[in-house]
Amino acid sequence: MHIHTALLPLVTMLRAGLLARAARRAGARVLLHVHSGLAQTWLTTRSRRALAARVLGPVDRLIVVTEGSRAALAAALGADRVVLIDNGVKIEPSAPPPAAHQPPRILYVGVLSPRKGLIELSQASSLLLERGVDHEVWLVGGTPEEGDAPEAEVRAATGDRALFLGVRPREDMPAIYREADVFCLPSWYEGMPLSILEAMAAGLPVVATAVGDVGRAVADSVTGRVIAVHDVSALASALEILLRDPALRQRMGNAGRERVEAGFDIHKTCARVDALYTELSRRSA
């Protein structure tokens, strides 16, 4: 059994533990795939680590997507049971880059919530306009899992300064990335965001906050800029440099695509998961 979870304690951990226990009783091996990067924010005491070890005892292997999660869960469950496998994305065939748009476009992809840094992005956009940097902000996404209130807060703070494109089918996303000039994800917290990897695979420079494992994907000043959380001034300055310099955007975008091809190709991710399946199957034979 391969269980996918955010593992945001305590309820999701208990649920994962119950599923794992049922699977082991049925004779199955269990993989638990942890997709968030927040395990380390909860596993901070000896009692919590002991609880995690007990609840997740039936799990054979935990797959994590961030270094922080690996360290925290290894401390609770043992390093031999936790493996880091990077998220991967499909890399579309390369194509000639589109001409720079005028005005240039900043793209965000994700749920519409303040925790994604969208109010800070709106404030940075206002600063850019005050500095005479013309641009557009495109927001792709919809209501977060916590309900309508966060989306309403984002829309109220943003006003008419952004274009809301709504939730779009996955097959539309390659074209949307190609219609942008810079990708921005100024989140308060993340794991290893697929949106950043998709943007890099599409050849976009990325401006993002130094949360989770973003810094392992975005090489600061090489494939984009990595800034502090909540720092509106730094966000505006990082975006301004890229918006004013199409050649820099192109260089960073090319470097980002190369980085994804080398380390975050979905085929490599699948191969590593398949290797775990093989290992656990041999143990149960």
Image: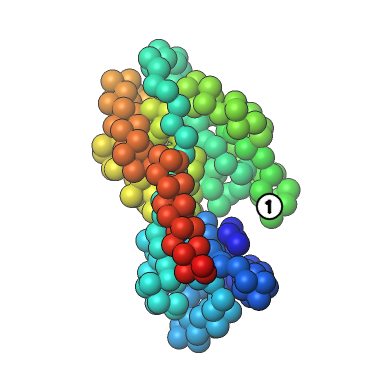
Image quadrant containing the N terminus: bottom right
The residue at 62%/71% (across/down) is 27
Q: Position of residue 146 (x, y in %)?
A: 69, 55
Say left or right for 248 vs 159: left
Residue 42 position, x and y percent, is: 50, 73
In the figure, 143 relative to 179: above or below? below
Q: Residue at x 49, y 58 (%)?
A: 277
Quarter-wise, where is residue 55 in the image?
bottom right
- Asked whether 98 or 50 is in front, the reply is 50
Residue reaching furthest to the right: 148
User: Which corner quadrant of the image does residue 257 belong to?
Assistant: top left
Tell which of 61 and 147 is nearer to you.
61
Colouring scheme applied when the structure was drawn: rainbow
Q: Which residue is mark 1?
A: 145
175, 270: nearer the viewer: 270
Q: Is residue 5 left or right of residue 237?
A: right
Q: Residues within 10 Å of mark 1 (few under 14, many from 20)?
A: few
Q: Secondary structure at mark 1?
A: loop
Q: Where residue 108 sits in the image (x, y, percent)? A: 52, 36
Q: In the displayed structure, would residue 54 be above or below residue 201?
A: below
Residue 198: image x %, image y %?
46, 35
Residue 282 visible? The answer is yes
Number of dots carrying numbers: 1
- Nearest the viewer among 10 and 277 is 277
**Does residue 234 appear in the picture of this structure?**
no
Residue at horizontal 34%, vertical 29%?
A: 253
Q: Tag 1: residue type? A: Glu
